[in-house]
Image (cartoon, rainbow, N blue to C red):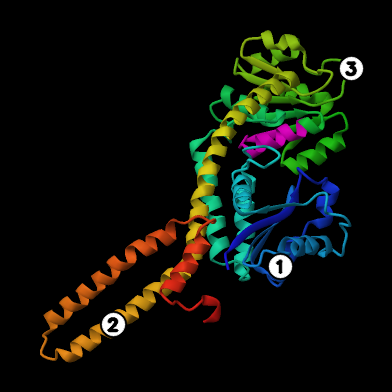
Amino acid sequence: MQHEVLIVGLSHHTASVGVREAVAFADEQIDDVNRRLCGLEGVDEAAVVCTCNRVEVVGCTRASVGVSERIAEFLRGAQGGAAHDLVPHLYRYWGRDAVRHLFRVASSLDSMVVGEPQILGQLKQFYARAASVGATGAVLHRWFHKAFSVAKRVRTETGIAGRAVSVSSAAVELASTIFDRLEDKTAMLIGAGKMGELAARHLLGNGVGRMMVTNRTFDRAVELAREFHATPVPFEHFGKYLPMADIVIGSAAATSYVLTEPMIHDTLRERKGRPMFCIDLSVPRTFDPRINAIDNVYLYDIDDLGTVAEENRGERGREADKAEHIVAEEVESFWRWLGHLEAVPTIVALRDKMEAIRRGELQKTLNALKDLGPREREALESMTEAIVNKILHTPITRLKQQDKRTEAFYIDAARRLFDIEDADES
């Protein structure tokens, strides 16, 4: 029977977070889930992939009838039937479509944010978990590792991950263009708005050296500072700390400007003209726009950052097109390998049979020519090996070259012509 590859699952494209939560598996369940999947009728190999955005079963079967339905039912009932009706949310990919889907997932072409790097690491972990309990075999091993190499090729040959596509990540990108390095820089977060928090997290994640946090409610400043390993600053005194800040993030609700032109002039004098990067993420704005006219001060508001992110989305879109071409090439490469895999048992059996005939006939000849020396015996061995290899070269090449439409015919013909016992009967 031929190997078939399939993927059954749901993602942010097809299901809300509530549905995904009802299906998702906890970390401690993953090993048992992989074992149980392999216990389903017709499932030869399986690996569950479970992230915040997707729950998918990657599988291999040689009895395709009913397999995807059994996996779908498994997903529906695995969490005590918490997900009552999965049918509208599930997708089922077979063959090339399944191969393409896994390659696109690994390359982050199927992610909420195209180009994000986390999914590749997650895929590697889920594959390793499945392999560790014996749920994977030759097909999934090759399929996943091919997906990893495709993702690496996409990142190497395209700029898909090179540009920021969220407002908060755009802030970090701009900061990196203003300052040579962030490790020796200090940032100040003014206010506790969600956008400001995200920008602060991105800055810390990209290596900014120190962080200060101020808020009208000092307890909230202390809470955020603890989370960020930062220094809390009383709101009424934040102006005194401003000269230490290379990057200032505004995320406060206010009816008047929190950061004014005179404050920045005073701050720059103390900083001896060293540049400042100011990000106003508040609506309405809380940083005086006239600040941008001051030398060595770079002010961006949320619209500016949104424009940068949108431009980068367009750039990522163009790079994603390149990535799709790479995926298409690699799908065909894997498909050829999978096609050859079907012919492998026949090729091995054919070689074994020919080798047995060669050895048997050679031994008869050697028994009849008892006076032959070692050199002559070795020459006969080499000659008979060469004859068998030349005879087998064309049949084996033809078997390897067939696609899914014709390979079954050629495999069956080879077995009949050479009287090779069917693998299922051996």
Indicate yes or no whether the magenta region holds residue 412. no
User: Label 3: which residue?
Assistant: 255
Amino acid, disc 2:
Arg
Mark 1 or 3, nearer chain start: 1
Question: Based on the displayed image, in which of its 4 quarters is residue 167 positioned?
Answer: top right
Checking the image for residue 105, the label placed there is none
Question: Picture coordinates of residue 353 (x, y %)?
Answer: 38, 78
Mark 2 or 1, nearer chain start: 1
Locate the N terminus and report the quarter of the image it occupies: bottom right
Amino acid, disc 1:
Leu
How far apart are labels 2 and 3 at the CA level? 95 Å
How far apart are labels 1 and 3 at the CA level? 58 Å
Please, what secondary structure does the residue beneath circle 1 have? helix
Closer to the observer: label 2 or label 1? Answer: 2
User: Label 1: which residue?
Assistant: 37
**Residue 52 visible from this viewpoint:** no
Is 162 positioned to the left or the right of 30 in the image? left
